[in-house]
Image (tube, rainbow, N blue to C red):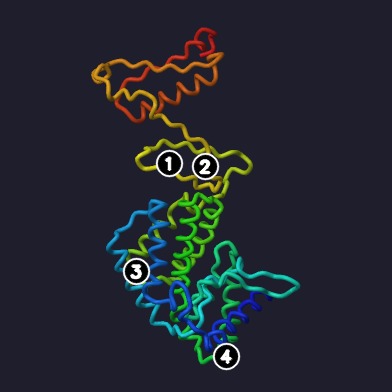
Amino acid sequence: IEYYKDALLHLVRFQIDGNKGLDYSVCYPKNKFDNQSVLWDLNYFKYYFLKLAKITFDEQKLEDDFHFFSKYLLEADSKYFMYRDFQSRNILLRDDQLYFIDYQGGRKGALQYDVASLLFQAKANLSTQIRDELLEYYLVQVSQKSKVKSKNFLKYYYGFVLIRLLQTLGAYGFRGYFENKSHFLLSIPFALKNLQWLVEKSHISKNLPELKKIISSILQNEELKNLGLTKSGNRLKVTIKSFSYRNGIPKDFSGNGGGFVFDCRSLENPGRYPEYANSTNLMINFGCTGGQHRSVYCAENIAKHINNKFKVDVSLYHTQLNKKGIA
């Protein structure tokens, strides 16, 4: 906690003292966190998380929410230096001193963004009590260097928490789904935990109906919430899927980077042959060495599948078991 407080003390210096005389014209790619910057972050979330995770949404309604949200955030006082990626992975500790990296995205902006970045970093998984303690500490420190009032700061703070979380989910989606760096996916459940907290505390504006609907859908998605988690102790969990190559190979939500993929396109498609179109009989055989275990299992499961899915008459025979008088 003391290191966090030290980091926040440095952050106040960066934001207030660092702002004095700084030439923002050399900032890249933008000199300030403006409307375009906000929409870049929100679209990052839309295209690299929502679409790659196959979360459905109304495009126009979401765009309307994005523009409303951007206008709201930009009402906050934005005359300070924004570090942009102020989180624990960019704070190094050596000889009991803190060192800071990865500030190349810095620009002029609001104070709230960097505080949200540090205190709501997904995998840091800070408790609500610790976040509140650190936020209070920051507000005391920043008030000593500026005329910032806690009430005005908090008015916009949770909006910046939300956009930071959405931007982070976009980054996890880009690195995890698009670049197939599966370890980034493991941070998603922690980010969703923070989103859940925002929902429970009613910190998401009712003026963002489509975004609220999307967040609710995300929070109900069991695959996303359980990425990297195992519910069966040390037992292996096997997931089997069928898919269409037209829609791409299914993503591995476990964080292990995938398993086996078998391409069935080289097999003949019976639907394309007229002799099968009016067939009234179809035989399916499974064989193994003894005819008592593997083939029995496969036969019983395909029979169960066909019974459940199609209106046909299914007869199931275990020839080897019958011969031995077991069945």
Circle number at residue 134: none
For residue 139, above or below residue 37 = below
Q: Please tell me which of labels 2 and 1 falls first in the chain.
A: 1
Q: Position of residue 145 (x, y in %)?
A: 57, 90
Q: Please tell me which of labels 4 and 3 falls first in the chain.
A: 3
Q: Please tell me which of labels 2 and 4 falls first in the chain.
A: 4
Instruction: Give the residue type at disc 4.
Output: Lys
Return the residue nearer the eye: 197 or 115. 115
Q: In the image, which is nearer the foreground, mark 1 or mark 3?
A: 1
Return the residue nearer the eye: 309 or 110. 110
Whole-Å distance between the Cαs marked 2 and 1? 10 Å
10 Å neighbourhood of mark 4: few (<14), some, or many (≥20)? few
Evaluate if marks 1 and 3 touch, with contact meaning CB atoms under 8 Å apart.
no
Evaluate if marks 4 and 3 touch, with contact meaning CB atoms under 8 Å apart.
no
Q: Which residue is mark 1?
A: 249
Q: Please tell me which of labels 1 and 4 falls first in the chain.
A: 4
Residue 76 figure quarter: bottom left
Circle number at residue 145: 4
Q: Please tell me which of labels 3 and 2 falls first in the chain.
A: 3
Evaluate if marks 1 and 4 touch, with contact meaning CB atoms under 8 Å apart.
no
Q: Which residue is mark 2?
A: 258
Q: Which residue is mark 3?
A: 66
